[in-house]
Amino acid sequence: MKRHLSIVVNGEPRDLFVEPRTLLVQVLRDHLGLKGTRQGCDSSSCAACTVIVEGMAVKSCSILAMQVNGKQIMTIEGLAEESKLHPIQQAFIDNWAFQCGYCTSGQIMSAKALLDENPDPTREEIQTAMDGHLCRCTGYNMINEAVRDAAKRLQARKAGKEA
């Protein structure tokens, strides 16, 4: 028996009916067509499916959709501002912190949650926040550098200067 699910995704209220066993990643991809959130494994170990729920980075393959009923969710599709990439997205591009791109959206969402909470993280804090993200294509050092660069860009934007 399907249940009513009411969530706000990327600032847009969404009401739908889902089976109680439906995962959040399935709702985002299959019901709402938000394909940027990817499921890379079946064990919640790769973090490619990371989204932000109420300000916290969450693996969307490890949570039932009904557990986020009434909550705010942000996916990679909600980051860009009109046609301009978010500073974190641009930092990942500029620092070559991706190759195939499959895991990148999850990494960017974890970086956003980190930088929202801690705008000037140390290298170790970035490594801790990004722990659990598996990437088979690129070096983790480039990802760390991209997050450090994104922090600088966001600080400059907040100060009124584009980085």
Image (cartoon, helix red, strand yellow):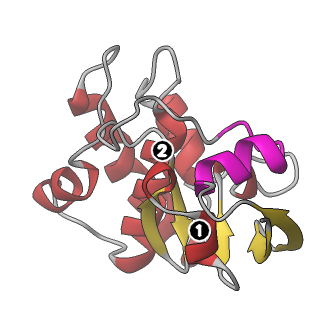
Picture residue at 63% right of the left edge, 73% below the top = 66
Question: Marks 1/2: CA distance?
Answer: 23 Å
Above or below, 127 relative to 120: above
Over which residues does the magenta segment extend?
23-36
Q: Which of 87 and 56 is in front in this view?
A: 56
Look at mark 2 in the image and give the residue it sits on.
Answer: 106
Residue 68's tag is none
Residue at far left of view: 124
Q: Is mark 2 on a helix, strand or loop?
A: helix
Q: Which quarter of the rendering shows the N terminus?
A: bottom right
Percent coordinates x, y for residue 68 in the rendering: 60, 76
Which one is nearer the viewer's eye here, 59 or 88?
A: 59
State the count of labels: 2
Which amino acid, by three-letter code, is at mark 1? Arg
Residue 132 image offset from top left, x and y in percent: 24, 44
Is 33 magenta? The answer is: yes
> Is tag 1's residue or tag 2's residue first in the polypeptide sequence?
2
Q: Where is residue 110 in the image (x, y as percent from the top left)?
A: 41, 56
Q: Which amino acid does label 2 sit on?
A: Gly
Query: Which label was assigned to residue 157?
Result: 1
Is residue 139 left or right of 123 when viewed as pictured? right
x, y percentage for residue 14? 87, 70
